[in-house]
């Protein structure tokens, strides 16, 4: 396959949009800043100049699709756009007063409700000023056919500096590349489900194209696929109001949680930080279903958790290098402690199994299908029978980042919604806290605040299970070191 040709997985995200008008398959986020030193915000010309000076690090961002639709005899390729106009990709908008968080999320919701123009390079950035207190934001979206969540790290590297008084470091291997492995640059090796799939990812990357060429070496892969299909396709995900027609208009909400209490919960109760994230999502979804008067599925809702399977460190590597895990979320369990145990057990069970391998093999096998027939396979990979909700957890920078010398104060992460999937949850860590970005179909989830509040309350539920510090027992005598009066 030519280097500039889309893979079958890349093309899947184009096909999902072509198949249903409600599917919007772009990813991205919002980077929020306070006022510049001395007040004010950068101008649109300054932002364009800033990006133009760094865009050569991401040559794909000057390229467009050779054909805007899939379905022919070959996959589309990336080709240089002879009419590339940076000004058309970087725009300016002002947030209506009062410019508070609610107004910001409403603006972002509208921004993500519009598809990217396939006749041009598939990305946009907006400089948004007018935020309360003189703040501003850089809001971007990139089509999923162009990059996955880890690949869009390149956008962050393009826009941000690691020091208040310096520009970005010069490219140095994968640490400066758009498709840097999650263990490179400022991205630590991801926690929980993503970390332990590294070896499975290495096998899976080879498995798809080799499966038919080496039939005597496919027993393990075959067993893994059968297990996945029986558990996650023949035994379908439960029916839920989360899986109904959603329309193309989005609603976005956020939850900010301090990272330290979550780390303490993980340390004391066991599991991984990603288990705490999945638990929080579980409790929020439970609250949402209860508020709707909906029966709670005993087998749990099924979450699709994307898994990074990058195995190489290539400068400027974009495209999609992901597999999936399917994890049961015990929304029917009322007891917080027991619910957390079930989440950890589900993660551990999938960790010990071959699910990531099987999912990757299935994706690899779709490469063998002619492009004209591939749309039915794209529907299968994102069918509601397979999963109810997407939850992605991307580890972000542990230290402060800057743009124009101003510290980044918040990141709002966004995950795309496929047809009939009403809710998606994206989580990113930054500095000392984690942000849950909730995206939903506006008409189908008018009660998104219930999910938001349920996630916010989940950390408190587990915190009460932690042992309290013991006080010195004096039995009528002063504690050691206490002064007599």
Image (cartoon, rainbow, N blue to C red):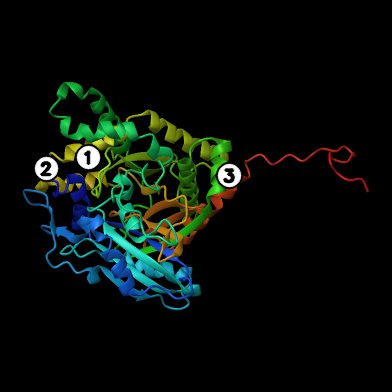
Q: Is residue 330 visible?
A: no
Q: Nearer the viewer, residue 40 or 239?
A: 40
The residue located at (24%, 35%) in the rendering is 205
- Residue 42 falls in image quadrant: bottom left
For discs 3 and 2, the disc positioned in front in the rendered view: 2
Of labels 3 and 1, earlier in sequence is 1
Q: How many marks?
A: 3
The secondary structure type at the circle numbered 3 is helix
Where is mark 1, residue-wise? 363
For discs 1 and 2, the disc positioned in front in the rendered view: 2
Q: Is residue 396 left or right of residue 377?
A: right
Q: Nearer the viewer, residue 378 or 300?
A: 378
Where is mark 2, residue-wise? 1
Distance of mark 3 from mark 1, alpha carbons?
37 Å
- Mark seen at residue 143: none
| Image vertical order of residue 271 relative to residue 376, above or below | above
Distance of mark 1 from mark 2, alpha carbons?
16 Å
Give percent across and percent down for residue 268. Answer: 58, 37
Question: Do labels 3 and 2 touch, CB within 8 Å?
Answer: no
| Image vertical order of residue 104 relative to residue 262, above or below | below
The secondary structure type at the circle numbered 2 is loop
Where is mark 3, residue-wise? 462
Of labels 1 and 2, earlier in sequence is 2
The residue located at (56%, 53%) in the rendering is 457
């Amino acid at each position: 396959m030519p280097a500039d040709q889309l893979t079958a997985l890349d093309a899947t995200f184009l096909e999902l949009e072509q198949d249903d008008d409600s599917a919007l398959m772009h990813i991205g986020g919002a980077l929020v800043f306070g006022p510049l030193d001395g007040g004010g915000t950068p101008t649109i010309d300054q932002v364009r100049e800033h990006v133009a000076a760094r865009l050569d690090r991401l040559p794909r961002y000057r390229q467009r699709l050779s054909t805007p639709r899939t379905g022919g005899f070959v996959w589309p390729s990336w080709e240089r756009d002879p009419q590339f106009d940076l000004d058309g990709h970087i725009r300016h908008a002002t947030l209506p007063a009062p410019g508070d968080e609610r107004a910001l999320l409403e603006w972002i919701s509208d921004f993500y409700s519009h598809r990217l123009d396939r006749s041009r390079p598939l990305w946009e950035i907006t400089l948004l000023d007018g935020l309360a207190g003189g703040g501003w934001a850089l809001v971007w979206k990139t089509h999923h056919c162009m990059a996955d969540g880890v690949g869009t790290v390149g956008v962050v590297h393009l826009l941000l500096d690691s020091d208040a008084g310096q520009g970005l470091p010069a490219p140095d291997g994968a640490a400066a590349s758009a498709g840097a492995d999650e263990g490179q640059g400022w991205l630590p090796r991801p926690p929980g489900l993503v970390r332990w799939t590294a070896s499975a990812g290495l096998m899976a990357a080879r498995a798809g194209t080799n499966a038919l060429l080496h039939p005597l070496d496919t027993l393990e892969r075959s067993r893994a696929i059968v297990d996945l299909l029986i558990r996650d396709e023949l035994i379908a995900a439960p029916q839920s109001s989360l899986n109904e027609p959603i329309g193309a208009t989005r609603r976005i909400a956020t939850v900010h949680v301090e990272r330290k209490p979550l780390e303490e919960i993980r340390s004391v109760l066991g599991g991984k930080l990603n288990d705490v994230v999945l638990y929080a999502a579980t409790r929020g979804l439970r609250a949402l279903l209860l508020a709707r008067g909906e029966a709670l599925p005993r087998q749990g809702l099924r979450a699709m958790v994307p898994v990074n399977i990058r195995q190489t460190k290539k400068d400027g590597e974009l495209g999609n290098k992901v597999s999936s895990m399917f994890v049961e979320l015990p929304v029917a369990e009322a007891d917080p402690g027991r619910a957390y145990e079930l989440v950890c057990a589900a993660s551990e069970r999938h960790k010990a199994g071959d699910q990531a391998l099987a999912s990757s093999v299935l994706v690899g096998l779709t490469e063998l299908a002619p492009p004209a027939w591939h749309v039915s396979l794209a529907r299968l990979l994102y069918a509601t029978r397979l999963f109810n909700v997407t939850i992605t957890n991307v580890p972000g920078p542990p230290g402060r980042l800057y743009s124009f010398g101003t510290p980044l104060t918040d990141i709002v992460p966004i995950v795309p919604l496929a047809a009939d999937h009403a809710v998606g949850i994206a989580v990113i860590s930054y500095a000392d806290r984690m942000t849950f970005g909730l995206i939903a179909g506006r008409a189908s989830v008018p009660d998104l605040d219930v999910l938001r509040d349920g996630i916010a309350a989940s950390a408190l539920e587990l915190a009460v299970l932690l042992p309290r510090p013991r006080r010195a027992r004096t039995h009528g005598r002063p504690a050691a070191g206490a002064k007599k009066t």
